[in-house]
Image: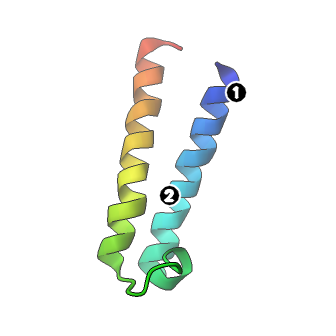
Amino acid sequence: MAVFKLLLMISLALAALGVLLGLWRPVIVLWWLDYQNRRRVLQYYGTALLLLGALWLLLRWLGA
């Protein structure tokens, strides 16, 4: 379980970094799309950040 929590925290940190970099320059994190804007950054990386954060809080609440 400790390995899963560590991977979850690393993924959470990478998603947060993606949001921050994407809000600064969207082309850095959305290089594979033809059209990059900050809304898509929040759509992709913001959703991942919220879901991973909710999962991390759920695991903390359950005491795992």
Identify the residue under disc 1.
3
Amino acid beneath label 1: Val
Quadrant of the rendered image containing residue 34: bottom left
**Point 47% across, 32% down: residue:** 56
x, y percentage for residue 55?
A: 42, 32
Q: In this view, does 31 lie above or below 40?
A: below
Q: Is residue 40 left or right of residue 12?
A: left
Asked if one can make out residue 25 in the rendered structure from this viewpoint, the answer is no
Dot 2 crowding, Cα within 10 Å, few <14, some 14–19, many 20+? some
Which of these two is toward me, 30 or 61?
30
x, y percentage for residue 33?
A: 45, 80
Which residue occupies the extreme top position in the image? 63
x, y percentage for residue 17?
A: 55, 63
x, y percentage for residue 5?
A: 61, 29
Question: Which numbered disc, 1 or 2, marks the residue that appears first in the sequence?
Answer: 1
Dot 1 crowding, Cα within 10 Å, few <14, some 14–19, many 20+? few
**Point 51% across, 56% down: residue:** 15
Q: Is residue 50 above or below residue 28?
A: above
Quadrant, the N terminus:
top right
Residue 16 is labelled as: 2
Amino acid beneath label 2: Ala
Q: In this view, does 37 lie to the left or right of 24?
A: left
